[in-house]
Image: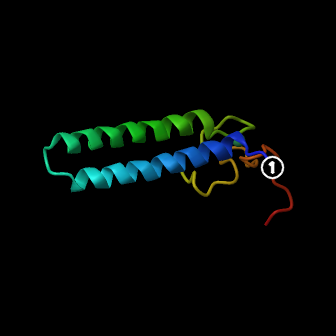
Amino acid sequence: MKKSKFESGRQAAKILALLSVGTCLASLMAGEGTPLQLALAVLTLVLFVSIFTVAAVRCRCPHCGKMVIFGLWNATTCPRCKRSLTTGNKIKGKK
Ligand SMILES: [Zn+2]
C-alpha cells in the first residue's frame, strides 16, 4: 500500500528528530568551545528547523489543511475536522 503524504512526512520528521537528538548529545560530549561542538550545535539547529519545515509542508490534514504538530507522533485524526489524517475520510463507527 502506498504511504500517504502525511505518513511519509511524519516519518521524515521522526528521522530528523532522532538525528537532532544524536547531534545534540554528540555536541554535549564534544569538548566545550571546540569547533566540533560548534559544528554539532549548528547541525542540531538546522535539523530542528527542518523538522518544523517538514511538518509545516507535509504534516497537514488532507481535508482541511490544518497543520498537525502537537501530538504528531500519535495523531490519527485532524483536531479541526476530525477526519483521518492519512486518508482524509470521515472516521465512522470507530470507538
Ligand atoms: Zn482537517
Q: Quadrant of the C terminus?
A: bottom right
Q: Is residue 92 above or below residue 67?
A: below
Identity of the residue furthest to the front in this view: 36
Q: Amino acid at mark 1?
A: Met
Q: Is residue 5 left or right of residue 18?
A: right
- Cβ at disc 1 under 8 Å from ligand 1: no
Which residue carries the number 1 mark?
1
Q: Is residue 17 left or right of residue 83?
A: left
Identity of the residue furthest to the left in this view: 33
The image shows residue 6 at horizontal and vertical percentages of 67, 43
Q: What residue is drawn where x is 18% and y is 39%?
A: 35
Q: How is the image coloured?
A: rainbow
Q: Is residue 5 above or below residue 21?
A: above
Report how many numbered discs are placed on residues in the image: 1
Quadrant for residue 92, please give it.
bottom right
The image shows residue 42 at horizontal and vertical percentages of 29, 38
- Can residue 69 be seen by looking at this rendering? no
The image shows residue 49 at horizontal and vertical percentages of 42, 36
Q: What residue is drawn where x is 14% and y is 49%?
A: 32
Q: Secondary structure at mark 1?
A: loop
Within 10 Å of the Cα at label 1, are there few (<14), some (14-19), or many (20+) other Cα atoms? few
Q: Ligand 1 sits in which quadrant?
A: top right
Residue in the foreground of this view, choosing between 79 and 3: 3
- Can residue 24 be seen by looking at this rendering? yes
The image shows residue 31 at horizontal and vertical percentages of 15, 51
